[in-house]
Image: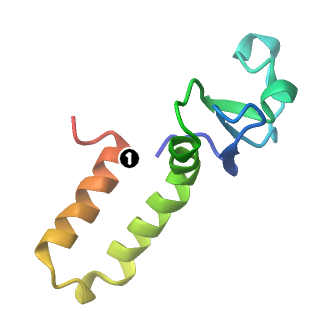
Amino acid sequence: MSHSKGQWSVGKAGSVVTTEPVIIQSRESGHNDVEYYGGYLIAESIFTIGDANLIAAAPEMLEALEEVLKYHNDEIHDINLWQKVELAIKKARGENK
């Protein structure tokens, strides 16, 4: 999977989601406003704080769903729930296009 690593969180501006400024980027990387945003920019112009919180939680939710399929495969007896989990993982990975 190829998403930005690090802890995602709602940035200082409230309408952005950022990741921790862990890796030093060059000025040409587009990440020149790390201090302003509170981290490297993941998403901007987010309409509500609820949307920002949901986006910030996405990496942890994906990891949790992947663990559910990996470790609790035999315990999911509801086919609709199983399909929802699989579709959500595919959507997060960009595999549902």
Q: Residue at x 53, y 47 (%)?
A: 50
Which residue is depicted at the point 52% across and 30% down?
Answer: 47
Q: In the depicted view, which residue is nearer to us: 46 or 77?
A: 46
* 89 lies left or right of 6: left
Direction from residue 22 to residue 60 in the image, left or right = left
Snapshot colouring: rainbow
Please name the residue that numbered disc 1 is placed on.
92
Estimate how packed mark 1 is, as few (under 14), some (14 to 19) or many (20 or more) residues with alpha carbons within 10 Å. some
Residue positioned most to the right: 35
Q: Secondary structure at mark 1?
A: helix
Q: Position of residue 17 (x, y in %)?
A: 64, 37
In the rendered image, the vertical position of residue 70 relative to residue 43, given as above or below? below
Q: Residue at x 81, y 20 (%)?
A: 33
Q: Looking at the picture, how far across and down is residue 76, in whole percent?
A: 23, 83
Up/down of 1 relative to 40, above or below = below
Position of residue 2 measured from the top left corner of the image (x, y, whole percent) = 50, 40
Quadrant of res 35: top right
Looking at the image, which residue is at 46% across and 46% down? 1
Picture quadrant where residue 45 is located: top right
**Furthest residue toward bottom:** 75
Left or right: 65, with 86 as reference point: right
Tell whether 32 sits left or right of 85: right
Q: Quadrant of residue 49?
A: top right
Residue type, numbered disc 1: Ala
In the rendered image, the vertical position of residue 37 relative to residue 55, given as above or below: above
**Quarter of the rendering occupied by the C terminus:** top left
